Image (cartoon, coloured by chain):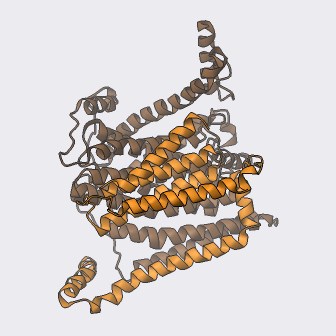
Amino acid sequence: MIGDFIKGLFLMLWRVVSDQPDAKADLLPVFAPPLQPVISAVLTVSPILIVFASLFALTTWIERKGLGRIQNRLGPNRVGPCGLFQPVADGLKMLTKEDIVPRSADKLIHFLAPIVLAVPTMLAFAVLPYGRNLVPIDIDAGILFFFAVGASTELAIFMAGWSSRNKYSLLGAMRAIAQMISYEIPLIISSVAVIMIAGSLSPVQIVEQQSGYLFGGLVPHWFVLTPWGLAGFVIFLIASLAESNRSPFDIPEAESELIAGHLTEYSGFKYALFFMAEYFGMFAVSGLAVTLFLGGWHAPFEFLDFVPSYIWFFSKLMALVVLFIWIRGTVPRLRVDQLLNFAWKFMLPMSLLNLVVAAVWHFTAVWNFPGAILGRWLLGAVMIAVPYVVLGRALTGSKKVTLRTYRFAN
Amino acid sequence: MGIAFAIIAALTLVSGIAAMSLRNLVHCALCLAVTFAGLAALYLQLGAQFVGFAQILVYIGAVAILVVFAILLTRSGEPVPHPVVSRSAIVGVAIAVVVFSVLTKLILSSAIIHRTLPDKPSPTVKQIGTQLMTYYVLPLEVIGLLLTAATIGAVIIAMQEKKKALPSLPVEQGKVHAELHHAPKAADDLISQP
């Protein structure tokens, strides 16, 4: 019994590490048949939680170190080598801190808000294909599921802001919801282009559509390498920055105006839960960007195909996260009116136009003269670049844009 | 069916009743969101993935938020002092009981309950999409046109409020509004000056 269990466990780990299907095949028969579904679910869920919780810890460290580097300071450097154990210290501090609830707060909703926020962000991890054989749930409407659980986080932020009975919290929550609703539309429309081309809502099939290589295995068949895919990827990235309330779209928790927005009245581990949900949301939406545009778990070159698929997925994910951190360290915060104008007047028309470009790309697939790919690429690129310039000029209007000089940075 | 159905049904019913009877309007709205979630869970349990996810996306992601915004923008969300159950409640309950019993009698005496149920359909999202784009393409386009018209109408209503409503306001209010309206422009001018 115990021997079988250990053997099954090792076989499972080996199969996961070496990218083989049916990892649980030897471990599950050890248990009684009625227990098997539960054990199977636990075996699927726990690695997701462990991996993303440790990625969360690692990312906070990378973020603080990276921002420190950008801002010409050291960042955390006391706990562990290079401050690597700082997240552990922070977690312990959060756990042992007093949990303060304002006297006039709505106690029940104040308590429920972080939970209602954390659960959907974790659910979003369920449909992403992490590797060739690593898909927690392979459902037909996976992308729809992702956006559905993503949409239910807005209510949690409202609950947090309203129940705190603090005007900063409420203002922050209202801003957050307005921002999330506005940017959800370009986010979804830019992924609709991928769904149209792939002809499927299933993340697994979308990744399969991006397999294969061109030009002797040097250029992958990823959607980001098409004109509509590139434009869609950029729109998706900007919208996902706004969805996860990251800088330059961190208006809901703008320190200089709103203290910390809807997080103002939260302390201790509830605050940590909000913080974690924010980072989990960032991971989930980056994972979806990798799945939709960056070829999922496929290797960038054919000769690198021997590297296990999940390594590629997580490298791409972390590359996107580092890009987010870089943007945070570089770009200043927007004003509320700028943010909403940008969403409705620029992002929305561009994402709708991107749908048309995707359709043109699809229908010009029958072209077969020499250099057809180049011709299609140029056609798509022109169809996006010209409206981009025209719309950008029209929206900037008569405002004079001059080069700014920063005295202290030069 | 079974335990899962019982839990979901109880949750939906209880939150629905709470949404009707709680004093605080925001609590009611949140309970309504739980009801929506319960309905979505029921759809999912019936194997209707698309409907279930669309229910979450539309009702929890949009309708509940809209309700909450409407409450916050119209009144302060403070609990109402007087009791929610009014004196005409007894009449209402009586009417509800009569209507329910009539409907039950009609359903039980009709031929519907003797009909054999068809095989459980398992529509995939792909099938729904194909049907929408082929057989039901005209209704789909009509709905699309209607929604576009509604969106444009909403934009036009919002625009009129800015330009035409101002002169008709009383003097003092109009002054404040005009100042508010011109404030961003003045700020813009300030910024663009070298």
Counting from the top left corner in percent of width and height, residue A251 is at: 32, 59
Q: Is residue A92 left or right of residue A237?
A: left
Q: Residue at x 73, y 65 (%)?
A: B133
Res A229 seen here: no
Colour displayed for chain A in the image of the structure = brown
Identify which residue, A243 or B71, lies in the foreground: B71
Counting from the top left corner in percent of width and height, residue A408 is at: 23, 58
Colour displayed for chain B in the image of the structure = orange
Q: Quadrant of residue A232?
A: bottom right
Q: Is residue A14 left or right of residue B131?
A: left
The quarter of the picture where the N terminus of chain B appears is top right
Counting from the top left corner in percent of width and height, residue A45 is at: 53, 31
**In the picture shown, does residue B75 fall above or below A8?**
below
The quarter of the picture where the C terminus of chain B appears is bottom left
Q: Residue at x 72, y 70 (%)?
A: B137
Identify which residue, A343 or A168, lies in the foreground: A168
Q: Residue at x 29, y 53 (%)?
A: A161
Q: Is residue A220 left or right of residue A2?
A: right
Res A241 seen here: yes
Identify which residue, A163 or B103, lies in the foreground: B103
Counting from the top left corner in percent of width and height, residue A6 is at: 59, 12
Count of labels in the image: 0
Q: Residue at x 32, y 46 (%)?
A: A109
**In the picture shown, does residue A174 fall above or below A318?**
below
Q: Is residue A386 left or right of residue B168?
A: right
Identify which residue, A86 or A275, lies in the foreground: A275
